[in-house]
Every structure is written in C-alpha cells, then in structure tokens.
Image: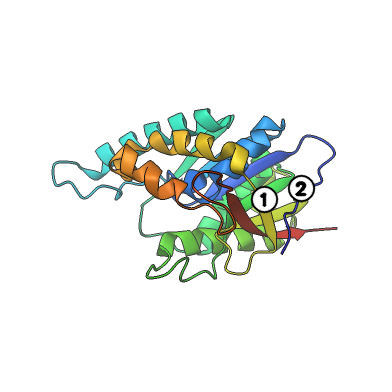
Amino acid sequence: MILYPEGWGESQRILVILAHPDDPEFFCGATIARWTTAGHRVEYCLLTRGDKGNDNPDFGGEQVARMREEEQRAAAAVLGVVDVRFLDYPDGYLVADIGLRREVVRVIRQVRPDILVTCDPTNLFPRANAINHADHRAAGQAVLDAYYPGAGNRMFFPELLEEGLQPHRVKELWLASASQPNVVLDVTDHWETKLRALHAHASQIGDPEKFDERMRARHTVDSTAEAPRYEERFYRLIFD
C-alpha cells in the first residue's frame, strides 16, 4: 500500500454520511481538514443525533441529542465544513431498510456531491478487542445501497422526481474505517486540527489531556512521539 494523493485537479463537493455526531471526526477528521484546506467543499449528513450517547440518568434522550448536535456543529466548524444536517433517526436502532435508503438517496440528490464518504459496513472488528457499532455498519450499508442503484436511476423512488430531485451519480466513493483499505493519506499536518475538532465533543472524550495522549500515540509504527506521522485509511472506489 502506498501514500495515495487524491489527484483532483479542481475543487470537489464532498458529502460525508455517517451514523452519529463525532463519527466524521473520529473516522476521518484529519482527512476532512486536509480537504477543506485544499479548497474542497465538505458537507455532513448524520443519520442520528446521538441521543443515546450519554448514560447519565439525569439526562433524557432529547437533552443528549441537543447537546450532541451542538457539539457536532462546533466540531464541523473547526474543520471548515460548510453544512451539517441530521436525519434524526433514533440512535442505536439504525436498520439499512428501504426507508433509510430512500432518505439517503434524497440527500444525495439534494447535495449532488462529486465524492461520497461513509464507513465500511463489512468491518465487524475495527481494532483489537472492539466490535463495530451496529449503527456504523447500517449507515455504511444504507449509503452503499443508496448510491447503487438508487441515487442515479430515475426508476427508483419516483416520488423524489416529484420533489424535483433528479438522479445523480457520484464520481467516487470513500469508505472510512475500511477492513481492507486501498488508500492511505498522510494527514500529519492536520492531526492537531482533528484533535481540536474532537475537543468540541466534550460529552464523548472524557479528560481532554488523557484523550490527546491516546490520540497522539496513534502515530505510524515508523515514526516516534518526537517526530510523529499520522495516516487515515480508506477503501476508495472510482467510477467511470
């Protein structure tokens, strides 16, 4: 595997669709910073508002959802993301069914991105002693199924045509947290920006100093804490 520059000759419109607030920053925040710094337009669609992302009995689900929505908007602003939308599905209950697929197709046709980013639905075990969240897998599956064949074929969801949403085909699909990545981006220059964005998710990261210590330890094996290098990996599909 090699460090793989994107090779885009002009500004791209990039749509990131993931399950929860904080997923974009954890999965690919440094890459998003790399893209916005290069002049690309990045937008988010989060399928849930993360209403189960706090187990404090003093908090209700709606209170948690409002807090996490605010945190997500703040984190996106740090990375230079221009728009954040939420589909408001219940956290923890995502299913890649026809209803979710229709909603994702609607968003793709509304935004009409060049590049579509989601996560790998086949990645059951993203790291040692960890099971991938079911919502992550459902989100990735729904986005793949929405991309092909629904988003680009007018025979799918004809009711969207009545809304004025014409079919749209993206040029590339990028899967973060990929089980078999084929693209590696050197994001060293943007790792600290990723951390600043993640600090906006105060309800999720715990002690900021300990969190930063853990995140800075994720440098590549061929680098050191004194001279770190950081990567983010994807499975990239380029369509003709």
Label 1, label 2: how far apart the Cα atoms are: 9 Å
Q: Are marks 1 and 2 in contact (CB under 8 Å)?
A: yes
Up/down of 93 relative to 170, above or below:
below
Foreground pick, 91 / 216? 216
- Circle 2 — which element? loop
Q: Earlier in the sequence, mark 1 or mark 2?
A: 2
Q: Which mark is residue 185?
A: 1
In front of the other: label 1 or label 2?
A: 1
Q: Is residue 14 left or right of residue 77?
A: right
**Where the N terminus falls, by quadrant?**
bottom right
Tell me the residue at 25%/44% (across/down).
61
Report which residue position mark 2 lands on: 6
Up/down of 125 relative to 31, above or below:
below
- Circle 1 — which element? strand
Which amino acid type is marked by label 1?
Answer: Leu
- In the displayed orientation, state which residue is furthest to the left: 58
**Residue 96 placement (x, y as % from top left):** 50, 64
Choose top left, top right, bottom left or bottom right for residue 189. Answer: top right
Q: Is residue 87 left or right of residue 207?
A: right
Foreground pick, 233 / 176? 233
